[in-house]
Image (cartoon, rainbow, N blue to C red):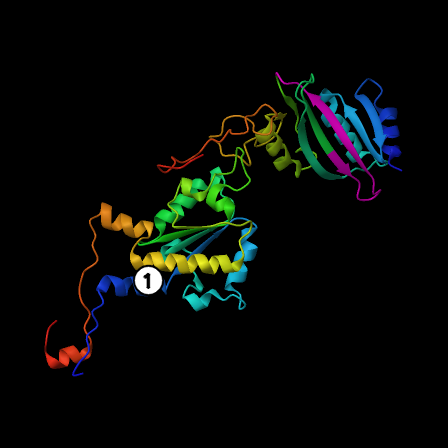
Amino acid sequence: MPFSVYTSKLAQAVNWARKFSLFEYPFVTACCGMEFMATWAPKYDIARFGAELPRFSPRQADLLIVVGTITERQGPVLRRIYDQMCEPKWVIAYGVCASTGGFYQNYSAMPGADQVIPVDVYIPGCPPRPEQMLDALVMLQERIQKGEGHSQVVLRAERGYVAPDVAIRAEGDVKEGRGR
Amino acid sequence: MAKIILDRLVEHFVAGEIVETGSQHGNEWARVAPANWRAVAQFLRDDPVTALNMFIDLTCVDRLGRTPRFDVVMHLYSVDKKHRVRLLAAVSEEDPHIDSLVALWPGANWFEREAFDLYGVRFVGHPDLRRILMYPEFVGHPLRKDFPKEGRQPLLRRLPGSVD
């Protein structure tokens, strides 16, 4: 073979890079946090999936993980944190409380974080096991690769943003001086 | 052992300030006329025999259907004598108020704010009687028995498609 050509589209390559370099913002409010911490620990080691760096500033994070019960009073805080994150951004609701409100049906608990922010992946369980977090992360990575994350869809639909459809070429291509 | 406290109370307050006293499983309690709430608390704190110098807890109980409707409950402990007592005072539904004890125990501040927030009992003389757990926009007092279970009052507009 005189040269080889990578025919991957730029958007696919960018999404591939995004899905393996997720910077998390853990919004931990309740007991789910104990199980969630184990996901970082050596036994489960979320670093294997490229998401090992928690950023405790939403401006440096692109994956918001809502861990635990959200109260009505926390709603504006959660929304502001989500709004501060750079796009594209993704949200995982960890545990039933963050997903649906769980067993709370009262004056103070919000029935799910998705009341105020869009959620990409829901994890059931009270609390979920660390494996479920890893499973959800892989699930989210698949969605990121396909461009199906909520924020990615919004970027495309509402703001008319389309990732450049450009082919990436290998160096052999350049050497030969031939275009695709 | 803690019978000392009740004896001392009944002995000192003879003009009907102490409505009722009782003891169950070694736990002594005294029901105080609400107008004397602060005077009784101050006596128990300063009297060398009782010396109940530590404020443990203050909360409220909604006895819906009873008149007067609310009970304000306080727990006191003596660090020196190692005995404790529970004080109760009935508060009416129409004008729920009782004296604040922040001047006696600064630690009572947040307890009284909590009781005010969740039950609507006003503590007269409290330096900063605001809601402490619920947000200022919240209407009503959620731990009252007649507060609806689904009494959510969202601060934010819900996203379209959310199910309550």
At horizontal 80% and vertical 30% (from top left) the residue drawn is B29
Q: Quadrant of residue A11?
A: bottom left
Extreme residue in the left direction: A178
Q: Is residue B105 magenta?
A: no
At horizontal 20% and vertical 49% (from top left) the residue drawn is A160
Q: Is residue A151 above or below residue B87?
A: below
Residue B62 is situated, as x and y percent measured from the top left of the image, at 66, 25
- The part of the chain drawn in magenta is B75-94
Residue A141 is situated, as x and y percent measured from the top left of the image, at 37, 60
Q: Is residue B33 above or below residue A149?
A: above
- Foreground pick, B1 / B119: B119
Q: Is residue A178 above or below residue B46?
A: below
Q: Is residue A129 left or right of residue B50?
A: left
Could you tell me which secondary element the residue under label 1 belongs to? Answer: helix
Residue B138 is situated, as x and y percent measured from the top left of the image, at 49, 30
Q: Is residue B80 magenta?
A: yes
Type of amino acid at the residue the image marks with label 1? Arg
At horizontal 43% and vertical 45% (from top left) the residue drawn is A78
Residue indicated by mark 1: A18
Q: Quadrant of residue B40?
A: top right
Could one spot residue B109 in this view of the protein?
yes
Q: Is residue B69 above or below residue A34?
A: above
Q: Is residue A23 left or right of residue B12?
A: left
Query: Label 1 lies in what chain?
Result: A
Task: Please state, as top left, top right, bottom left or bottom right, where the N terminus of chain B lies in the image.
Answer: top right
Residue B126 is situated, as x and y percent measured from the top left of the image, at 61, 30
